[in-house]
């Protein structure tokens, strides 16, 4: 342990702390760049979500809500999808009209805010003419390992 002088103690401690943290942060950042391994939460979530009419799944990630609600055994499916407008009229798709419906016919509406897992999501807000398509990222808070179909519901 180095001998500390009264003057500059804090600076030396910060420099030592920084020197120890930089390699750890680099390893952590690189660990996040790996593709999903078979059996991981990302590949498992992709198997649990099926696309409905006019939806093409691009990516599905299952993440913990992080809000520590007691007895809450749920997770977020953060879904990147491509939606094609085949509804017969132009519309500006709303995130809360994307619906994940599980096997028990329970509907979970899409969201793009309200949790740290959804921060930074920005979607196209323009009008889609009939036949146009666009990519969207939508979050769904669902029970853990929920299985179901994802679709757009323009009826409400």
Image: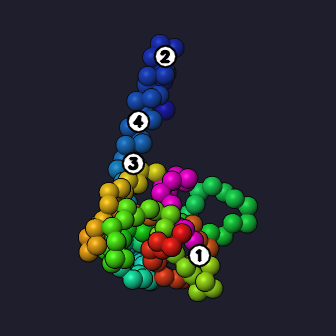
Q: Which mark is residue 25?
A: 3
Q: Nearer the viewer, mark 1 or mark 3?
A: 1
Compared with 28, 82 (above or below) is below
Q: Are marks 4 and 1 in contact (CB under 8 Å)?
A: no
Lower position in the chain sequence, tag 4 or tag 3:
4
| Residue closer to the observer: 14 or 7 | 14
Q: CA distance from mark 4 to mark 1?
A: 47 Å
Q: Which mark is residue 7?
A: none
Going 62% across and 79% down the picture, which residue do you hit? 106
Q: How many marks?
A: 4
Residue 97 image offset from top left, x and y in percent: 49, 67
Q: Which mark is residue 18?
A: 4
Q: CA distance from mark 1 to mark 2?
A: 64 Å
Q: Nearer the viewer, mark 2 or mark 4?
A: 4
Q: Is residue 50 magenta?
A: no
Q: Indicate the secondary structure of the residue bearing disc 4.
A: helix
Q: Is residue 110 magenta?
A: yes
Residue for badge 2: 5
Q: Are marks 1 and 3 in contact (CB under 8 Å)?
A: no
Q: Indicate the secondary structure of the residue bearing disc 1.
A: strand
Going 59% across and 57% down the picture, which residue do you hit? 66
Going 49% across and 32% down the picture, which residue do you hit? 1
Lower position in the chain sequence, tag 4 or tag 1:
4
Q: Are marks 2 and 4 in contact (CB under 8 Å)?
A: no
Q: Nearer the viewer, mark 4 or mark 3?
A: 3
Q: Are marks 1 and 2 in contact (CB under 8 Å)?
A: no
The extreme right residue here reads 70
Lower position in the chain sequence, tag 2 or tag 4:
2
């Amino acid at each position: 342990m180095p001998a500390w002088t009264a003057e500059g103690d804090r600076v030396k401690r910060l420099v030592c702390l920084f020197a120890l943290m930089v390699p750890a942060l680099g390893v952590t950042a690189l660990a996040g760049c790996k593709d999903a391994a078979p059996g991981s939460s990302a590949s498992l979530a992709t198997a649990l979500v099926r696309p409905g009419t006019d939806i093409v799944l691009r990516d599905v990630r299952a993440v913990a809500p992080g809000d520590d609600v007691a007895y809450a055994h749920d997770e977020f499916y953060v879904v990147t999808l491509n939606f094609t407008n085949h509804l017969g009229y132009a519309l500006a798709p709303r995130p809360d009209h994307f619906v994940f419906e599980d096997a028990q016919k329970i509907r979970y509406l899409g969201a793009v805010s309200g949790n740290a897992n959804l921060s930074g999501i920005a979607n196209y807000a323009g009008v889609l003419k009939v036949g146009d398509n666009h990519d969207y990222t939508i979050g769904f808070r669902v029970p853990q390992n929920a299985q179901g179909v994802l679709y757009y519901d323009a009826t409400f």
